[in-house]
Image (cartoon, rainbow, N blue to C red):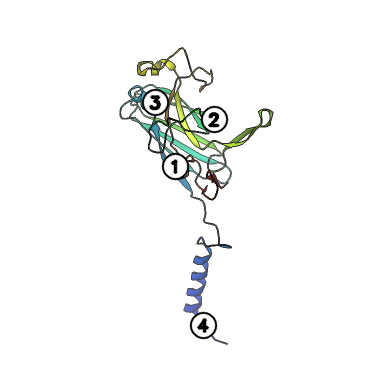
């Protein structure tokens, strides 16, 4: 029987441990999902002047053992604006931030939080719930199967705030508690190659269209 030195045994154990953590072929271990994702939301182009020319919105979602934690940061907005934050099934923008000419509607939408900008035009929103890879809703009464909402967007709470940019205030949207909101202000964009929203961190490209590994 060959006797290995202590150093050699340690090297072999380390190599085996490293190999077990890599993504292999059939029978290989599955790579861990990312601990967090960070992504920018993009302005709905028509309403740029009504949010502020330098407006930016960035979301960071940290995975948790029971629920995930979202921090949304707004900077460069006009002061004193109020928005309503939703997770939605579809975005009206393409991956490059331009308007999708084939867009029809946002699909399933969940009201998540309010967001306000302060006197400096900055704002924050915090949310703890299921978000990454598994957020969904369903309603058997209307034959709605489990449907993911992998996009994040926020709407003008007050329709009049978007009126100078051409919004028809006589036709409000349902995206606030009174169901009399203004238009979409900012929203996430689909990922290039998969078409999925950024709340899917683990896409499954073996399906057509791509799906998300829960």
**Left or right of residue 86: residue 95:** left
Residue at the outermost bottom position = 1
Q: CA distance from mark 3 to mark 4?
A: 66 Å
The secondary element bearing badge 4 is classed as: loop
User: Which residue is labeled 1 in the image?
Assistant: 191
Q: CA distance from mark 2 to mark 1?
A: 18 Å
Cα separation between marks 3 and 2: 27 Å
Q: Sort mark 1 into few (<14), some (14-19) or many (20+) by Cα contacts within 10 Å.
A: some
Rendering quarter of residue 163: top left
The mark nearer the N terminus, 3 or 1, is 3
> Marks 3 and 1, Cα distance to the nearest angstrom?
28 Å
Report the number of discs. 4
- Nearer-N-terminus badge (3/4): 4
Q: Residue at x 51, y 83 (%)?
A: 4
Residue carrying label 4: 4
| Residue hosting label 2 | 107
> Are the residues flagged by discs 2 and 1 in contact, CB closer than 8 Å?
no
Residue, x 47% and y 46% (percent of image)? 36
Which residue is pictured at 51% across the width and 77% down the height? Answer: 9
> Residue visible at 39% across and 28% down?
44
Tag 3 and tag 2, C-beta contact below 8 Å: no
In-image side of 19 versus 46 (left or right): right
Location of mark 3 (residue):
117
- Dot 2: element: loop
- For the N terminus, the image quarter is bottom right
Q: Residue 76 location, x and y as percent?
A: 33, 29
Mark closest to the chain's N terminus, 2 or 1:
2
């Amino acid at each position: 029987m060959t006797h290995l030195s202590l150093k050699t045994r340690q090297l072999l154990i380390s190599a085996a441990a490293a190999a077990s953590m890599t993504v292999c072929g059939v029978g290989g271990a599955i790579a861990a999902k990312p601990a967090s994702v960070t992504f920018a939301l993009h302005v709905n182009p028509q309403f740029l002047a009504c949010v502020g020319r330098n407006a930016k919105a960035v979301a960071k979602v940290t995975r948790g053992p029971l629920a995930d934690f979202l921090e949304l940061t707004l900077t460069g907005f006009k002061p004193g604006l109020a928005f309503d934050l939703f997770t939605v099934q579809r975005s009206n923008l393409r991956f490059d931030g331009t308007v999708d000419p084939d867009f029809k509607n946002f699909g399933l939408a969940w009201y998540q939080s309010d967001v306000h900008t302060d006197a400096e035009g900055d704002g924050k929103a915090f949310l703890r719930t299921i978000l990454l890879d598994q957020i969904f809703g369903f309603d058997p009464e209307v034959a709605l199967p489990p449907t993911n909402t992998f996009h994040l967007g926020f709407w003008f709470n007050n329709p009049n705030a978007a009126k100078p940019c051409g919004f028809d205030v006589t036709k409000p949207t349902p995206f606030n508690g009174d169901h009399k909101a203004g238009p979409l202000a900012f929203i996430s964009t689909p990922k290039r190659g998969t078409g999925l929203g950024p709340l899917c961190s683990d896409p499954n490209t073996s399906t057509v269209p791509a799906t998300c590994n829960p």
